[in-house]
Image: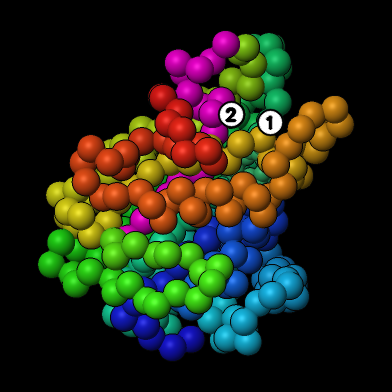
Amino acid sequence: MGTASNGFALVTPASRGIGFAFAQQLLARTTLPVVVTARKNCSEVRDRLLSSKELPSTADKRLRILEVDVKDESTISSMAETIHRELPDTPLRLALTVPGILHVEKSPSQIDAKNALDSFQVNALGPLLLTKHLSQFLPTKSSPAFSSETHAEGSLRLPSHAIYAMMAARVGSISDNNSGGWYSYRASKAAVYQITKTFDLYLRGRCKERALAVALHPGTVKTDFTKEFWSGREMLEPADSAQRLLEFLMDLEPGVKDGRGRCWDWKGEEVFP
Ligand SMILES: NC(=O)c1ccc[n+]([C@@H]2O[C@H](COP(=O)([O-])OP(=O)(O)OC[C@H]3O[C@@H](n4cnc5c(N)ncnc54)[C@H](OP(=O)(O)O)[C@@H]3O)[C@@H](O)[C@H]2O)c1
């Protein structure tokens, strides 16, 4: 991977679902180096990504895939070491952190301590540890703004600041909870709203308008995650959700009143905590 003063993009994980769709779009619609992660079978994930339609010939060179399991912090720190080594002095321009797992609990009696811990580890502690190891790559207030490139048709209009987006979920919203259930998933995703806000406050001090953090809700998307509910329910395709979210992110301004630190859905509407 070469260096690029224009920064790099990162999607973790990108093995399937929405993360995979994000990675496909970043390869197709930017010229940035794209770092993606998977828990296993990295070369198989790489082959699947590179066999996506309409990728530019540079995709192969720009794609780097690293093994990360967010339940094992050592894999996150070794990802950071590899980025330092392979992309020296290259700031993180766009980060999408999307790990998620659901153990269904319809009533309190169905709560299983091991499964609940798994949900908190993947959905809440995972994104938290990712901020710990990735924030060092974000531009600081004294960093130069990213330059705007001339864009080919269909390219993403990357802004001049960095964006760090974490996948939350509408069901993590306490004010929106009208149906109950899914105790540990809801609670672990509620934590993502808080992590995002707290991380964004840190970035406001350290990076000013050079970097912002937001949480996202992707809509109800047809992935393995929702397989149980596929029949009889309208769902977004992963590519459509990823496209809408990316386009929303590209337009988000970094001022304190512009929406940073909050959660936004695929339609660009705020999801209140
Ligand atoms: N689909 C929806 O309707 C919907 C709605 C709201 C929010 N979300 C959120 O969107 C995100 C992506 O969901 P999706 O629909 O794309 O689901 P998915 O297809 O089931 O993908 C889940 C992803 O999480 C990864 N993952 C699980 N455990 C992990 C771990 N320990 N370390 C690292 N990665 C791990 C999986 O990796 P492996 O391939 O290795 O298992 C997979 O890449 C999740 O955070 C989910 O909560 C989805």
Residue 136 visible in this rendered orientation of the protein: no
Left or right of 9 in this view: 143: left
Q: Which residue lies furthest to the front in this view?
A: 153
Q: Is mark 2 within 8 Å of ligand 1?
A: yes
Q: Magenta stretch? A: 162-178
- The residue that appears at 80% across and 38% down in the rendered structure is 227
Quarter of the rendering occupied by the C terminus: top left
Question: Front-most of 45 and 234?
Answer: 234
Say which residue label 1 marks: 103
Nearer the observer, 203 or 73: 203
Query: Which amino acid, mark 1?
Result: His
Residue 20 has which mark?
Answer: none
Q: What residue type is labelled 2?
A: Tyr
Applied colour scheme: rainbow
Label 1 to label 2: alpha-carbon separation: 7 Å
Q: Residues within 10 Å of mark 1 (few under 14, many from 20)?
A: some
Image spot of residue 212 (x, y percent): 30, 51
In the image, residue 126 above or below residue 102? below
Q: Are marks 1 and 2 in contact (CB under 8 Å)?
A: yes
**Residue 155 location in percent, x, y?**
51, 69
Instruction: Give percent across and percent down for residue 106.
Output: 70, 15
Measured along the vertical axis of the image, is residue 46 above or below residue 115?
below
The residue labelled by disc 2 is 185
As for residue 99 lying within the magenta part, the answer is no
Ranked by sequence position, the earlier of labels 1 and 2 is 1
Assess disc 2: are there few (<14), some (14-19) or many (≥20) residues with their C-alpha within 10 Å of its C-alpha. Answer: many
